[in-house]
Amino acid sequence: MNKKIRVLFAILSILIIAGCGNTKELSKDKTKTDDSKSTCSINNNGDYWINESMICPQFKDINSSGDRFFITNSGELYEYSDKKYSSTDNNCRKVETDVLFDKVVMNTIISKDGNFYSFHDGNLKKITNDEIEKGRGWYGIDQMEIKLYKTNNNIFYLFTKDLSGTETYVYVDNNNIYSVYYDYETNKISENLLYTLKNEEIINNITNGYITTNKGYYRYGVINQKECSEYADIKCEYGLVLVDTIDNCSNEIFYISNELIVTKKMVK
């Protein structure tokens, strides 16, 4: 009887050890899974709309984007949607036009030959000089950005989340970022130094809403958010706000703008 009990205990011991071994392996796997989770706040923050179910091969060649459209480095215009297109079986398709484009400022598209276009509901429309002078009578015509672009074709638009209705246009000169503004009453353009890059920080790209440097992703907004929201006698100060560092996001974010954030999962 004792012999049988000893054998039974031996079998139970083996099973317990084996079970513990499996538990350790599961723990290791779980640790790996946890370690692989995103650390990029852009990819985790609900303030930024990322639809990783969208797949578009042409995202790999994206140059700049607007509201539901983007242009490639070669100048082709594409539209994209949360739903797939039957003609491509993915979430983007080329807009049928012979015009090649150079840049997007907010939602105005500038062609390589210097003309201005709007794109809305699948319709590409050339903006005439007469329409530009009339101003913002309809979607896609933005007198401010066109007038600024005509004087400085290096301008970019920065979406300002903290200031409703405020438009911020900038250009870069060496390590300095200047804001530019067109005054409708005087027909003059004013500019102010907005930010100076330091510590060997270099701008890699500016899109609608974001400045990407070799160190991080920036947006224009309140730089003393805690103080200005808490105290009545402290004014909000505005400047470039670091959204996240390149180190946190370099393995995830392929392209970023206010209208479109593309992760590496979306460029298959």
Image (cartoon, grey):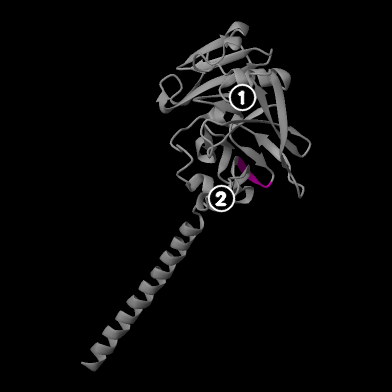
Secondary structure at badge 2 equals loop
Q: Farthest bottom residue?
A: 2
> In terms of secondary structure, where does tag 1 sit?
strand
> Residue 6 or 222: which is nearer the viewer?
222
Above or below, 27 against 108 in this view is: below
| Quarter of the picture holding the N terminus | bottom left
Label 2 neighbour load within 10 Å: few <14, some 14-19, many 20+: few
Q: 86 or 130: which is nearer to us?
A: 130
The span shown in magenta is: 215-219
Disc count in the image?
2
Residue 200 visible in rendering: yes
Numbered tag placed on residue 105 in the rendering = 1
Disc 2 marks which amino acid? Asp
Q: Taking 76 as reference, is 266 left or right?
A: left
Magenta portion: prevailing SS class: strand
Residue linked to disc 2: 233
Q: Position of residue 174 (x, y in %)?
A: 79, 36
